[in-house]
Amino acid sequence: MDNLILQVKKELISNSDAKTKDGAKRFFKESVKLYGVKTATVSKIAREYFKKIKNSEKAEILGLCENLWQSGYMENSFIACNWSFALREKYEPKDFELFESWINGYISNWATCDTFCNHTMGTFLEMYPQYLPRLKEWAKSKNRWTRRAAAVSLIVPAKRGKFLKEILGISDILLCDPDDMAQKGYGWLLKVASQAHQREVFDYVMANKSAMPRTALRYAIEKMPKSLKEKAMDK
């Protein structure tokens, strides 16, 4: 299996180019490790190599994901996200601790945070909603990416109209967070939730707009009708 990871990394390197690398770096304020491979190519490589391991033990595949996360390269982390999501039919409650450790230990930018949390964590939480209260602990973390994860892990469930109570609870905790990544995270979550629960989210925004950072506020109301946007933005 270690040989397979080496093959994956070699294939990524062979598909890298400086232009893609430099272009991608412009999307991040923080330093990121990149080979410089286009997203579509990374996804293709992930799918091709998963075919070789799909019949392996789940624990073995998750171990490969851990290896990829440890490298620190964004493309490797995207493949780890792809593979962990591909195992979704085999998720068990005990997986929460491992997934949480990846968020706390390896995620260091918005792209890997959102990719992992939208898909792997979002699906896990829909399957095992008893873990939703743990997100409130994440929202209080000193780690900015763990705080963002508390919000963006509920993006996909929010699209289905789920977990409104928890969404508003997470937003309460992150309401005055000084970090723009946390602000954009819960603002995005409220925006998505508003598509199924427009009145409830609008009422929440109106009740909290004096404290809510403008960044979060603008995200939250983005999909609302113009009349509601004007009311929300009115000082």
Image (cartoon, rainbow, N blue to C red):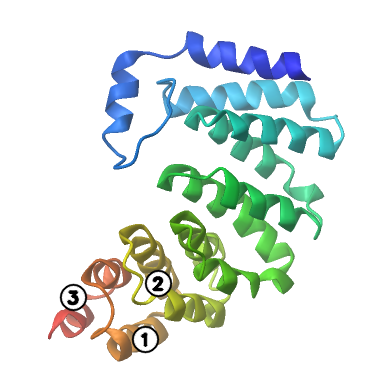
Asked if the residue at tag 3 contacts the one at tag 1, i.e. Cβ–Cβ closer than 8 Å, the answer is no
Q: Considering depth in this image, is 193 or 134 the residue closer to the camera?
A: 134
Q: Mark 1 is on which residue type?
A: Tyr
Residue with the mark numbered 2 = 190
x and y percentages locating residue 137 in the rendered image = 58, 71
Residue with the mark numbered 3 = 226
Q: Mark 3 is on which residue type?
A: Lys
Asked if the residue at tag 1 contacts the one at tag 2, i.e. Cβ–Cβ closer than 8 Å, the answer is yes
Counting other residues with Cα less than 10 Å from the Cα at mark 2, is it few (<14), some (14-19), or many (20 or more)? many
**Which element carries disc 3, helix, strand or loop?**
helix
Which of the two discs, 2 and 3, sits closer to the camera? 2
**Which element carries disc 2, helix, strand or loop?**
helix
Residue occupying the point 56% across, 66% down: 138
Q: CA distance from mark 2 to mark 1?
A: 9 Å
Q: Quadrant of residue 6?
A: top right
Q: Considering depth in this image, is 13 or 50 the residue closer to the camera?
A: 13
Q: Mark 2 is on which residue type?
A: Leu
Counting other residues with Cα less than 10 Å from the Cα at mark 3, is it few (<14), some (14-19), or many (20 or more)? few
Residue occupying the point 46% across, 27% down: 40
Q: Quadrant of the N terminus?
A: top right
The vertical placement of 5 against 208, above or below, is above
Residue occupying the point 41% across, 73% down: 174
Q: CA distance from mark 1 to mark 3?
A: 17 Å
